[in-house]
Amino acid sequence: MQLRRRHLLLPLALSFLAAALTVARAHNITRLLAKHPEFSTFNHYLTETHLAAEINSRTTITVMALDNAAMSRLLAPHPTIATLKNVLSLHVLLDYFGPKKLHQITNGTALAATLFQATGSAPGSTGFVNITDLKGGKVGFAPEDNNGRLDTYFVKGLEQIPYNISIIQISNALPSDVAAAPTPGPSEMNLTRLMSAHGCKVFADTLDANADAMKTYEDNVEGGLTTFCPLDDPFKQFLPKYKNLSAPGKASFLEFFAIPMYLSMAMLKSNNGPMNTLATDGASKYDFTVQNDGEEVTLKTRVNKVKITGTLLDEQPLAIYSIDKVLMPKELFKTAALTPAPAPAPEKAADSPKSSKAKSPPATADSPADSPESDPADQTADSNGSVRFKSARSGFLVLSLWFGVHFLL
């Protein structure tokens, strides 16, 4: 009996062990760098630019950290946060390079992709970094657009969790005119122009035409804004429903497509759950739920569900994503009706007339489908006493299950 119990508990123990190992593999870049106060400025700006969340969401990463002196030189021209994010994202490699691996690079050189390349903001291959194992134990780094000049070198390893995250110190910031190019601040960006240029012109024109909603968007950009714009074809089909809304309803509907905070794609993937929108106000919830499955991120209300199809802009504090359908708030539209399962054909009881009960209407998402508390067959006896038979059979099955569980334990 004890052996049987151990066999039953073994799968459970293994599942807990797997969960513990998964937790152990997780990393937090700010906590790791907090052990090294000489990198406090670099650590601060990883948080300020939201790169820390991007780094923590990756399973394999190398961070080339700059000490406070190197950060002072980088900050001297007073770059905007958006520009600084591009520069620092060039210092995050999408592969694991510990000190040992840097000195064992095949053929002495390697080309590594960076977070800057992954954002789509780097034209061509300017978001790649060359790593070269030099003579005398030196390792040099240079952006792909630096014409092969090696002006930055490996100093030492700081933290390693093989083969999850490696934090190394380099001598100075990687020089890149592309990454350091001035990036317009959020107040200088034209939201609707950006949407129009990337397949969301109909939604952008509709937003532009609504002064109240447009002002709400503009007032929230500086503090952080994430917006989701439906592509042209689905929004064209939706326009008749939009035109039937009241003036306050139209403003609330358009404000429903934005969250009053900056969320990168990595942050969306790690923030499953309900989100307040620009339309959320007191008793009027106007929220939706973020869900993800692997690389796919969806937004869901009690009316429908849409999928994020692309990133139009991701420059802190503003993110704009395209979605494949029009997300509809339950506050303005009826909840989607559930498709009722076909009812089984009633058994013909011997010597009984046909039932004349009316069909019940289909259930909706707001009201659960009506269902009897027990099997209808257990509520109506026929001339052969089938109620007693079915009840006895159910009791026998329950009793058998109870004995079976106790026997195994």
Image (spheres, rainbow, N blue to C red):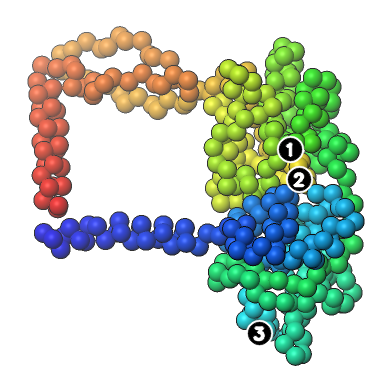
Q: Does 401 appear above or below 305?
A: below
* Residue 151 position by quadrant: bottom right
Return the residue nearer the eye: 141 or 192.
141
Residue 190 is marked as none
Proximity of marks 3 and 2: CB atoms separated by less than 8 Å: no
For the point 65% across and 74% down, the residue is 157
The spot of residue 78 in percent (x, y) is 88, 53
Judged by depth in the image, the label closer to the viewer, 3 or 1, is: 1
* Residue 400 position by quadrant: top left
Q: Does 206 appear above or below 313?
A: above
Q: In the rendered structure, which disc, 3 or 2, sits on the residue that comes first in sequence?
A: 3
The spot of residue 302 in percent (x, y) is 54, 27
Q: Does 28 appear above or below 190?
A: below
In the picture of the structure, the residue carrying the numbered disc 1 is 224
For the point 69% across and 27% down, the residue is 278
Return the residue nearer the eye: 298 or 118.
118
Q: CA distance from mark 3 to mark 1?
A: 43 Å
Q: In the rendered structure, which disc, 3 or 1, sits on the residue that comes first in sequence?
A: 3
Would you say residue 197 is visible in this rendering? Answer: no
Give the class, few, some or many, for how many residues have Cα within 10 Å of label 1's Cα (few <14, many ≥20): some
In the picture of the structure, the residue carrying the numbered disc 3 is 104
Amino acid on which the number 3 mark rests in the picture: Gln
Name the residue furthest bottom: 136
Amino acid on which the number 1 mark rests in the picture: Gly
Residue 316 is marked as 2
